[in-house]
Image: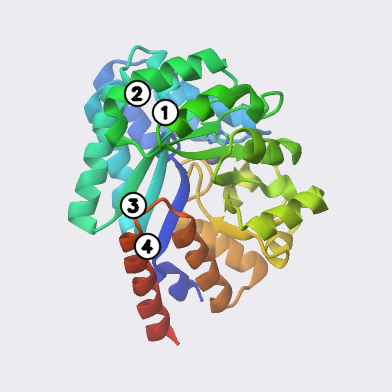
């Protein structure tokens, strides 16, 4: 089954590009940019990858991204991601980045986007991987900061497809960002938000009702509300679930204790993704393998999850049809 999973065409809809920065790259960028890290070796840095919860991860994640300063740094980071996932049969990726975290160090949004999008274009040329970039606001910052960031990003409007909401969830409800999502919607941007990762199921309903998001990132707490679960099933709202992330951030003790099987049984439109693969035990294949080991699913379930991801993506209709045809050809070969 792992052979089937490794060669299965994959679509990733929940991926923070800063969360793909491997310890080796952190050290080499620190050296290139003369940034002093609070770790003397890669092993010492890796030893810090032991998280109690989302916040303890975020503290390290924001610290490490301080090595990203130039367009080339953002390119190298993004290219490293594509070169790894090309070997895992990734065919389409929708990539978050956190502009406010880099603006705080004086790195312009244009610089950030130029590096990321150059790697995206090269990934399409070299590997045939299509992609889109989603600008994600930090929910522990103010809405004013998010509004300013959206304004600063507008000259680069053609380089990103939508906006998202990430960072510390507890105490930062979606409704705090109503105006910025309203403005983005008026601009024709696609809308997503992290909700119900650690936070309560109410944040999922709020993201749908107040922010009008089209997908929920994580959403694994939905199962604590039957009316919400029924709504998500009825409206077929896509949920970008990240299995290994949930274990590394102690959302669940083990995959067996996760809500993923109940979500599937409830008819929810689940997709599987890696979130921050350099921090959470691996990329798409590692997530798929861990899930397969926990649940022993059949090929039909994996095919359905892949169809869900194609359907939930922000790719063009033509590209969606191409990806569906590629999946069908693969399944026919494997049957
Ligand atoms: N930023 C990067 N990874 C995140 C996650 N899993 N939840 C919230 N914000 C994030
Ligand atoms: Zn995430």
Is 162 situated left or right of 68 in this image? right
Give the alpha-carbon distance from disc 3 to disc 4, as whole Å: 23 Å
Q: Percent from the top left, x then y, of residue 83?
A: 28, 51
Q: Label 4 belongs to which residue?
A: 320
Give the alpha-carbon distance from disc 4 to disc 1, as whole Å: 44 Å
Q: Looking at the rendering, in which quadrant would you find the C terminus? A: bottom left
Foreground: disc 1 or disc 2:
2
Residues at marks 1 and 2 touching, judged by CB atoms closer than 8 Å:
no
Ligand 2 is found in the corner quadrant, namely: top right
Give the alpha-carbon distance from disc 2 to disc 3, as whole Å: 28 Å
Q: Nearer the viewer, residue 328 or 34?
A: 328
Give the alpha-carbon distance from disc 4 to disc 2, as whole Å: 27 Å
Say whether disc 4 or disc 2 marks the residue closer to the N-terminus.
Answer: 2
Residues at marks 2 and 3 touching, judged by CB atoms closer than 8 Å:
no
Foreground: disc 2 or disc 3:
2
Q: Which mark is residue 84?
A: 3
Is 111 situated left or right of 170 in this image? left
Q: Label 1 belongs to which residue?
A: 41
What residue do we see at 28% from left, 28% from top? 156
Q: Percent from the top left, x then y, of residue 32?
A: 24, 22
Q: Nearer the viewer, residue 221 or 178?
A: 178
Q: Determine the secondary structure under disc 3.
A: helix
């Amino acid at each position: 089954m792992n052979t089937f999973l490794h060669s299965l065409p994959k679509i990733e809809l929940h991926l923070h590009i800063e969360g793909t920065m491997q310890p080796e790259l952190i050290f080499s960028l620190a050296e290139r940019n003369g940034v002093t890290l609070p770790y003397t070796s890669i092993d010492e840095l890796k030893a810090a990858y032991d998280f109690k919860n989302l916040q303890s991860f975020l503290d390290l994640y924001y610290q490490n991204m301080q090595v990203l300063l130039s367009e080339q740094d953002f390119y190298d980071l993004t290219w490293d991601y594509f070169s790894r996932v090309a070997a895992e049969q990734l065919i389409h990726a929708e990539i978050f980045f956190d502009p406010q975290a880099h603006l705080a160090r004086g790195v312009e949004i244009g610089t950030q986007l130029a590096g990321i999008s150059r790697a995206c274009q090269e990934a399409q040329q070299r590997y045939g991987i299509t992609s889109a970039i989603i600008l994600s606001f930090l929910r522990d910052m103010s809405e004013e900061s998010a509004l300013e960031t959206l304004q600063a990003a507008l000259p680069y409007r053609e380089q990103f497809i939508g906006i998202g909401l990430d960072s510390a969830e507890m105490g930062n409800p979606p409704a705090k960002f109503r105006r910025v999502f309203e403005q983005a919607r008026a601009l024709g941007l696609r809308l997503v938000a992290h909700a119900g990762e650690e936070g309560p199921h109410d944040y999922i309903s709020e993201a749908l009702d107040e922010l009008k998001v089209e997908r929920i990132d994580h959403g694994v707490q939905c199962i604590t509300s039957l009316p919400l679960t029924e709504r998500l099933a009825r409206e077929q709202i896509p949920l970008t679930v990240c299995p290994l992330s949930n274990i590394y951030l102690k959302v669940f003790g083990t995959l067996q204790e996760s809500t993923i099987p109940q979500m599937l049984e409830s008819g929810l439109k689940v997709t599987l993704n890696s979130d921050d693969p350099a921090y959470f035990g691996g990329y798409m294949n590692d997530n798929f393998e861990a899930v397969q080991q926990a649940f022993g699913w059949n090929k039909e379930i994996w095919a359905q999850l892949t169809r869900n991801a194609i359907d939930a993506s922000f790719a063009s209709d033509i590209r969606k049809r191409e990806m569906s045809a590629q999946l069908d050809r693969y399944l026919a070969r494997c049957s």
